[in-house]
Amino acid sequence: MTEGVLIHKKTDTGKIAGEMEEVTLIPKGKIDIKLEADVITPDSFAGKSAGEIGTLSVWQGPKTYPLSDFFEVIGNGGSSAAETLIRIKGDAMRVKRIGEGMSAGKIEIEGSAGMHVGTGMKGGEIVVYGDVDSWAGMEMLGGLLHIKGNAGDHVGCAYRGKWHGMKGGRIVIEGSARHNLGGGMDGGEILVDGNVEGFCGIRQNGGLIVVKGGALRGVGAEMAGGTIVVGGKIQRFAPGFEFVSMENKVTSGEVELIGEFKKFTGDYAISKRAKGALYVSADANPEL
């Protein structure tokens, strides 16, 4: 975000208290056809031994195989999901749906993660130390998805054919994201340290999106509610927004931002009753 703009998080919702049992997954080799591995969750691993975890089924193309065909499994699950930590020691970019629907516990990926990581997650924490492919945090309901690298398209989005995306929780991206970040978002928070590309917050109905860097085009297109803050340059500003005022602070939920912002509302190209709030850096966008 431009110089002089600060983010203050009033609380940290991502911390998990208590002792946890650790299950380590070590990739056995390169994966050709991508895996559908929605079983890699603390919920599925809880109460199971390493041997039992290894027998859980994953899909590869039209067939199922035991998880142990692709990963060495070390350690036992905790007595509950909240007491289970899963550590993937290696790259998992060709492994899809890690953490899908998880309700508690923690997953740490010491590399990158494939499509749909954290899809529909309800609670707990996922930390990815590399990049993530598209659809991360799709239709997320709660918890924390922390991405140390870059993210692909459709982070926190609704699935194709649906209108409602992320409803709760927090997604933190330390790098940049691509197109359609937060599409159809109804609640929760998405915080991006870098840049975004096209149509950030398209069809947004609620929640908060903060982009510290710049955006390509279509920010807030078809937006009906919620808040978007962009700290860098917007290359092509959406025409359906109207200037409201100058602001030096934005507060939304547990996030407070301080800086010089131009506040707009919209997207009036879709509805005259739209209540979306779009804050853009005054310094980076002097022409608006």
Image: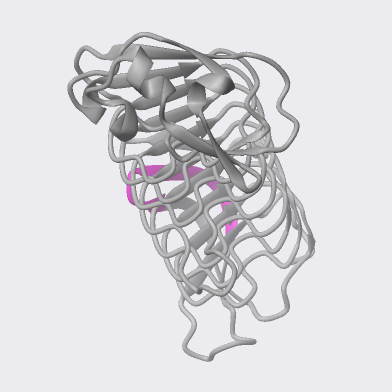
Query: What secondary structure do most residues of the magenta stretch adopt?
Result: strand
Q: Nearer the viewer, residue 47 or 242?
A: 47
Q: Is residue 89 above or below residue 145?
A: above
Check residue 287 for magenta coloring: no
Q: Position of residue 194 (x, y in %)?
A: 68, 38
Name the residue at the top extreme: 74
Residue drawn at x 43%, y 43% is 100
Q: Nearer the viewer, residue 252 or 99?
A: 99
Q: Nearer the viewer, residue 15 or 245?
A: 15
| Quarter of the view holding residue 263 | bottom right
In the visual, does 174 lie left or right of 20? right
| Quarter of the view holding residue 17 | top left
Question: Can residue 122 be seen?
Answer: yes
Residue drawn at x 67%, y 41% is 133
Q: Is residue 158 above or below residue 88?
A: below
Q: Is residue 100 above or below residue 16?
A: below
Q: Position of residue 8 (x, y in %)?
A: 42, 35
Question: Can residue 11 be seen?
Answer: no
Q: How many marks?
A: 0
Q: Position of residue 23 (x, y in %)?
A: 38, 14
Q: Which residues are magenta?
A: 251-262
- Locate the N terminus by quadrant: top right
In the visual, does 45 lie left or right of 140? left
Residue drawn at x 68%, y 51% is 153
Name the residue at the bottom extreme: 272
| Quarter of the view holding residue 177 | top right
Residue drawn at x 69%, y 39% is 176
